Image: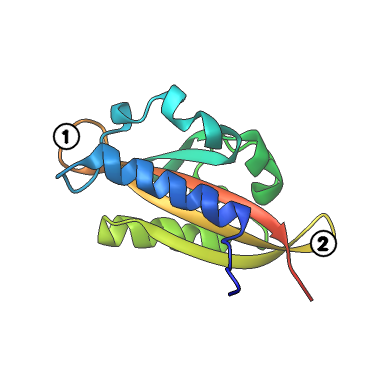
């Protein structure tokens, strides 16, 4: 019998989603403080934290492995200022999380450093301790696109 295994990126995103589910318990979503740096260590370089506000989304943190995805370190920058091929899929993902208040999985293709890459991504809503979503935790893993 042939057993298919999820790609490493998918396994990492699945594990992150499981951590999010565990930390939220019976609530709609966990608080940012429920996810410690120690909890998030396996994903740190591939994570971004976005603060959600009336004036748009701002990167609180942009992991170093996301620099190629976003064209450099975006820490402190508005999501609206992103440029390039991957900007719109990212903005759409964040918008879906904001609309639904639920996790969003997506994948998309983009040319990065002359190579076509597939990005597997997960966006998770978080509170700041209250009941409303105030933060999005975003994870992205690239893999070369198979021809």
Q: Looking at this view, is 10 or 57 the one in front?
A: 10
* Mark 1, other Cα within 10 Å: few <14 / some 14–19 / many ≥20: few
Q: Is residue 132 above or below residue 4?
A: above
* Mark 2, other Cα within 10 Å: few <14 / some 14–19 / many ≥20: few
Residue 99 is left or right of residue 108, and the answer is: left
- Location of residue 5 in the rendering, given as x and y in whole percent from the top left corner: 58, 62
The C terminus: image quadrant: bottom right
Contact between labelled residues 2 and 1, with CB atoms less than 8 Å apart: no
Residue 144 is left or right of residue 44, and the answer is: right
Secondary structure found at label 1: loop
Q: Is residue 94 above or below residue 15?
A: below
- Location of residue 93 in the rendering, given as x and y in whole percent from the top left corner: 44, 60
- Location of residue 146 in the rendering, given as x and y in whole percent from the top left corner: 76, 71
| Residue 110 in sight from this viewpoint | yes
The residue at 29%/46% (across/down) is: 21
Q: Looking at this view, is 110 or 24 the one in front?
A: 24
The N terminus: image quadrant: bottom right
Q: Looking at this view, is 71 or 12 the one in front?
A: 12
The residue at 54%/56% (across/down) is: 10
Where on the picture, by quarter, is residue 130? top left
The residue at 55%/65% (across/down) is: 107
Q: Which mark is residue 130?
A: 1
Q: Which residue is mark 2?
A: 115
Residue reaching furthest front? 1
Secondary structure found at label 2: strand
The residue at 58%/41% (across/down) is: 46
Q: Earlier in the sequence, mark 1 or mark 2?
A: 2
């Amino acid at each position: 019998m042939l057993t298919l295994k999820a790609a490493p990126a998918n396994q990492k995103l699945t594990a992150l989603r499981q951590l999010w589910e565990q930390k939220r318990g019976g609530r709609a979503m966990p608080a940012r403080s429920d996810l410690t740096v120690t909890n998030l260590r396996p994903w740190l370089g591939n994570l971004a934290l976005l603060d959600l506000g009336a004036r748009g989304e701002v990167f609180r943190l942009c992991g170093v492995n996301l620099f190629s995805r976003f064209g450099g370190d975006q820490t402190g920058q508005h999501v609206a200022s992103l440029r390039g091929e991957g900007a719109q899929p990212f903005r759409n993902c964040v918008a879906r999380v904001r609309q639904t208040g639920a996790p969003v999985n997506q994948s998309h293709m983009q040319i990065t450093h002359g190579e076509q890459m597939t990005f597997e991504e997960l966006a998770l809503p978080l509170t700041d301790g209250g009941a409303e979503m105030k933060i999005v935790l975003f994870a992205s893993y690239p893999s070369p696109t198979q021809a």
